[in-house]
Image (spheres, grey):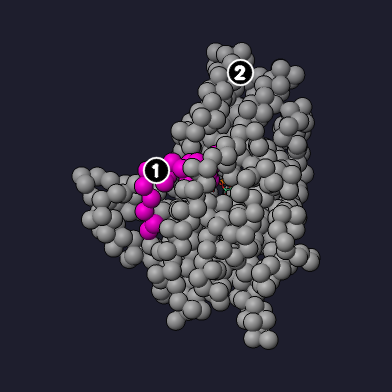
Amino acid sequence: MRKTIIVSNRLPVKISESNGEYNLQPSEGGLATGLGSIYREGNNIWVGWPGQEISDPKEQETVTKQLRKMNLLPVFLSQDEINNYYEGFSNETLWPVFHYMGVYARYDQGYWDAYYQVNKKFRDIILKIADPGDIIWIHDYQLLLLPGMLRAELPEISIGFFQHIPFPSFELFRLIPWRAEILEGMLGADLMGFHTFDDTRHFLNAVSRILPAQTSANVVSYNDRAIVVETFPMGIDFEKYSKLGSDPEVQKQMERLKENFQQEKLVLSIDRLDYSKGILQRLQAFELLLQLHPEYIGKVVLYMIVVPSRDTVPQYKDLRDEIDKLVGNINARFRTLAWHPIQYFYRSFPIETLSALYNFADICLVTPMRDGMNLVSKEYVASRNNNDGVLILSEMAGASKELIDALIVNPNNIGAITRSIVEAINMPKAEQERRMKAMRTVVAKFNVNHWVKLFMTRLREVNEMQQNMLAR
Ligand code: GDG
């Protein structure tokens, strides 16, 4: 029977260790939810790194057995591979360039070699399980070479690739010493997907400038194959966020928020620690608000969650220090005996806490410098069952192409963010409702299931087209 193989750097699983035993829990990320309907069915399978170094072959065997029962197949990585392929090439080379932060990028031959080898490791594991007629759907920037490596071995198999982060303009992309190899790797797919039309356009442009390939509209002709490149904006599980508001634990946490913030307007900010998320500029905008509008002192609170991430990479550690410093300065400068302007948390929270905050916050402030999509903005909208609340959204987030009824800002324009906060605080209920209703319609309709179905349907159609071309 034809099966679907999902491939991503990380498996949708959390592993914890106690008394020498491994405990495996399915993780709840957006992608895992969306693809759950696929990989759990029949003999379908999800291939990826379990997220922890397990070097003992016996332990690897035990974990593999447990994972197989969940339709998951592990690719074990050594600490060296994690350092060079994942933290190195993926997060210190590709991530900064793809987010337009070229100055942060390191071009290191050792990183590249490890990236190539780990993509090959994924290939070898997939080759052991792939049968003719299977569908392979590969995810994200850690595995850009994998489509080409698989294509070389399985010329007729159907391969889809989706990139979750932006694809930069040619002028940025060309900086990478291995740019041609990367594009060749990606073009091993039959269908290539990005979140926005701009990412799609940038990819097509890079292909036509760097490779001897023909591009016409959204089709690339390369090595006697036709590769279709399209835009698939990813959605979230709307129902889940909409329903969570009535969960007893969420209700309890909302009561507590109501008691703690009786007078104040709450401005919510949630991101992973990352320089692409514009956290410092957001803090500066909040500082400017308090400076220009002393009438808001004691009346507005910024509730800021930063989820720890990649803090072994030097830029992330520096960013964390700068955030600590700026939050400290703002709180010291503006606080009163009874009020703190910024409630800052450097940790992650259970989804019930996020839901309580999404439900309670008057304003959600999402101002990344660059973001492939940004799911936090969509989760806020899905949570607002009363159709109130204001979303302030960066024009550099993929989500801004769909959520056009948010207050859209340029994240580098500190003054504009400040003015948007003032506008949001004073927005009449009727206008909040008009905007929120329009956004909820979009987020409800183009949800994650819709995204998965659309991509899979297009992949099947493109594969049929390829088969017909080969038969001619
Ligand atoms: C990449 C791209 C693209 C956050 N804090 C907690 C927590 N979260 C969850 C949110 C949301 C997810 O993490 C973050 O998703 P984003 O889309 O905002 O950002 P990235 O992690 O950078 O994701 C991005 C995405 O891929 C999908 O294609 O949108 O552009 O960079 O779902 O809710 N979850 C829990 N506790 C927290 O403290 N449980």
Query: Which percent across, then down, holds residue 274?
Result: 57, 36
Pick the residue in front: 435 or 462.
462
Mark 2, Cα crowd under 10 Å, few <14 / some 14-19 / many 20+, is some
Examine the structure image and report whether residue 75 is included in the region drawn in magenta. Answer: yes
> What's under tag 1, amino acid-wise?
Asp
What count of labels does the image hold? 2
Task: Give the x, y percent position of residue 31.
Answer: 52, 56
Q: Main secondary structure of the magenta part?
A: helix
Residue displayed at 67% across by 24% down: 284
On screen, residue 364 above or below 223: above
* In the image, residue 456 above or below residue 332: below
Establish whether ligand 1 lies closer than 8 Å to the Cβ of label 2: no
Cα–Cα span, label 1 and label 2: 41 Å
**Can you say whether 284 is above or below 138 in the image?**
above
Highlighted range, magenta: 74-92
Which residue is labeled 1 in the image? 80
Q: Nearer the viewer, mark 1 or mark 2?
A: 1
Residue 436 on image: x %, y %: 70, 49
Considering the numbered disc 1 on the image, is that residue within a helix, a strand or a loop? helix
Query: Would residue 186 be found to the left or right of residue 123 on screen?
Result: right
Crowd class of label 1 (few under 14; some 14 to 19; many from 20; radius 10 Å): few
Query: Residue 355 at x, y = what percent?
Result: 52, 45
Farthest residue, direction left: 19
Can you identify the residue that label 2 sits on?
Answer: 330
In the figure, residue 370 lies in which quadrant?
Answer: top right
Q: Amino acid at mark 2?
A: Ile
Q: Residue at x 61, y 34 (%)?
A: 104
Asked if the stretch drawn in magenta spans residue 174, the answer is: no
N-terminal of the pair, mark 1 or mark 2, is 1
- Residue at horizontal 55%, vertical 63%? 147
